Image (cartoon, rainbow, N blue to C red):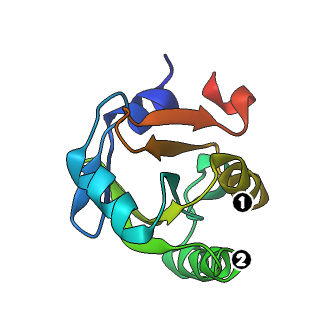
Amino acid sequence: MNQLERAYRGSGYEAAGAVARVGRRSPAVDALLARLGARHGGFLGAWNPFSRRMPPGWNRRLQALLRQAARRLPAAEGWGGTARWREAHCLFGGDPRRLAVLARRFRQAAFVVVRRGQPARLVWVFPRLRG
């Protein structure tokens, strides 16, 4: 497992107070998905395309473009990361295949898929970045 995958797997993914971790179930995320009217969804942001650090203003603009592109999906704003790094994202309710299209469009290496009653899982959009 390379450093990027360790970072994704070691991160917490939060939205509206509900936190998910890869490989674990989260009753709080299940409840949030229910409030959003969704059986499944994913944590997705637009910051730092291809996992390359970008300036804060650039990241905020990209995040706003992602929110516009996903405006028809139910969403809850949030943050993800570790003690050393954080970035904005949203928990979008909806089909993970649609979220994968958005992740590819916004050049995200991976995103976290959640389904009610199941552990969160990491989905690679650009597997070559996995290492």
The residue drawn where x is 51% and y is 21% is: 2
Instruction: State left or right for residue 112 relative to residue 31.
Output: right
* Residue sitting farthest toward the top: 1
Give the number of the disc on residue 69. Answer: 2
Residue 104 position in % (x across, y down): 75, 52
Q: Is residue 92 above or below residue 64?
A: above
Above or below residue 27? Residue 2 is: above
Give x and y (percent) for residue 67: 60, 78
Residue at image x 49%, y 29%?
5
Q: Residue at x 65, y 51 (%)?
A: 108
Is 35 rendered above or below residue 96?
Answer: below
Question: Does residue 82 appear left or right of residue 121 in this picture?
Answer: left
Residue 118 figure quarter: top left
Which amino acid is tagged 2? Ala
In the rendered image, which quarter is residue 117 located in? Answer: top left
Q: Nearer the viewer, residue 55 or 123?
A: 123
Q: How far apart, in angstroms, are the residues tagged by discs 2 and 1? A: 8 Å
> Of residues 30 and 112, which is closer to you in this image?
30
- What residue sits 48% from the left and 60% below the top? 38
The answer to whether 74 appears left or right of 118 in the picture is: right
Tag 1 residue: 102
Q: Position of residue 4 (x, y in %)?
A: 50, 33
Q: Secondary structure at mark 2?
A: helix
Q: Amino acid at mark 1?
A: Leu
Tag 1 secondary structure: helix
